[in-house]
Image (cartoon, helix red, strand yellow):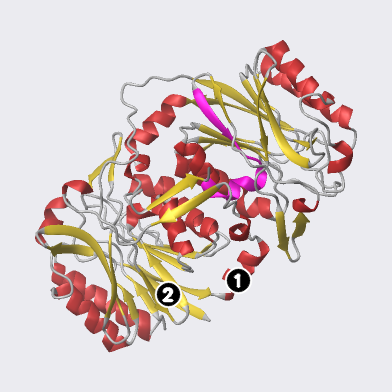
Amino acid sequence: MTIKIALIQLRVVDSKEKNLKNATDLIRISKKEKEANVVVLPECFNAPYTVDTLKVVAEPIPEGPTSRALSNAARDYGVYVVGGSIVESSGGLLYNTCTVWGPEGDLLTTYRKVHLCDSSLSGKTTVPETKLFTPGSGFATFTVGETKIGLGICWDMRFPEFAAAYRKLQCDLLIYPAVCDVPTGELHWELLAKARALDNQAFVAFCSPARDTHAKLIPYGHSLVVDPWGAVIQRATEFQEIVVADLVLKELTQVRHRIPVFEQKRADLYELKHITDRAFTAGCNFENYDNMARAGFRIALLQLKVGANKSQNIENAISKIRSAVSDKGARVVALPECFNSPYGTQHFPEYAEEIPTGETSRSLAAIAKELGIYLIGGTIPERCATDSKLYNTCTIWSPEGALMATYRKIHLFDINIPGGITFRESDVLTGGANLATVAIDGAKVGIGICYDIRFDELARLYRNQGCDMLIYPGAFNMKTGPLHWELLARGRANDTQSYVATISPARDASAGYVAWGHSMLVDPWAKIVGEAAEGEETVVADVNLKTVDEVRAQIPIFSQRRTDLYNTNAVV
């Protein structure tokens, strides 16, 4: 089955009547000329997005003029209409509400915006929706054929658990009408769409009003549709236009079979609980960064060549650690996944050693102590002394040479991409069962390994524990690297408002497993602050904890999470 979706990037003017006429004309064109069977309008499409204007145009649903116009258009043209959003008046309260109309003109569902936008980008944009709207208290879905579709509005897109709840409800398409301003649009619009699609292996559509440079809040535009691989299918410019995309639903089955992350989630370690139709209760998970002044540290990411000789691999790592500290002034040094061993299930048993008594552990402890640094020891194949099982394990060493923590890779890399790569870590390795955090110069740091980065729940648990930074030694390959390496790093940074470091081995085209490279550090704004190419290289950048605090204060999504509707919890 294929759904043809049309996103109407409407130019919104001061007249409700003109906006409704423009919308219905474009619905007609979307159906009659573009042959769409689902048409989407933007957030607040019947009036400019300002507090004063929106109060004036509020109306009841479904009795108001906007509802009647959308119902008639859906019926007249035989099309599903996702009615963007309007200001709904009900019981003396105002809501930001999306209506969905069936081809017979019937009201299929309504969705009231759950997460209200209270943000303040310093010197740029301040939006106080809580002064106008009451938040919604539930999810909303509808079906087109056999396809289940979930709804969000604008700010909702910043909450990964909200999207994940829809995925648990078996949704294959997520639609977000939105008015995103230019500053945040340039930062996060496309990234958020791609991240929601990739994490949930679903199609995602964001529909914006057209840009109006005379408006009080200038919409970003660039409505877009993203496929379940995280790739943009269609994207608008900033002007009024109709974006049409074919959603080939068999792609959902393909991606979910080839990268089966939903089958590989660790329900023994974490769970996402979602609750439907529950009354809103304010005041959960609030945090306050006012008057907090924190420093940071300089980190070096070592993208190392890895060969067949373990001793040479270790010697190379020690040499590069010395250079990073003496030449670059690094306080923290991070190594890549499997830095002492070629990456492959056939190699793990041969190169495995016990921790902390093995050759690699002794070398890392000694250099950390000698240089007085924190050392994130990439990973090595670990042979457990008690049960002889093999693990893919990261060790973290203190400036005194003490073993601060170990982290065993929780999510093992088992995928099958025809024509790309087939790999099964679980044939040899055992998955870990515990998170690991360490304190480094005032920062709390959480550890994951490679494939773990695909699991938002793990990053969310670390964020819930107060982590400021996530470090993922990883060895993505030449298929998954170009697709998802950067997207996942930036997505995790944006969702958790933390620094994220990903450290790869250097690319070796002659190896049995060819690593992607491109080790990088991403800041809490989701900006890349340092990135390697594909060869052996050291990336050095400063982690500024004040940036963490500023981002979380200006875009306070952690305090705005609706834990009355969803929550990611560790399983004890």
Marks 2,1: beta carbons within 8 A: no
The amino acid at mark 1 is: Thr
Position above or below: 405 against 528: above
- In the image, 168: left or right of 397? left
Rounded to the nearest angstrom, the CA distance separating label 2 from label 1 is: 19 Å
Residue 550 belongs to magenta span: no
Secondary structure type for disc 1: helix
Residue 72 % position (x, y): 22, 84
Residue 354 in view, yes or no: yes
Q: Quadrant of residue 13?
A: bottom left
Q: Which residues are magenta?
A: 443-457
- In the image, 198: left or right of 413? left
The amino acid at mark 2 is: Ile
253 and 223: which one is in front? 253
The residue lying at 32 percent from left, 76 percent from top is 81
In front: mark 2 or mark 1? Answer: 1
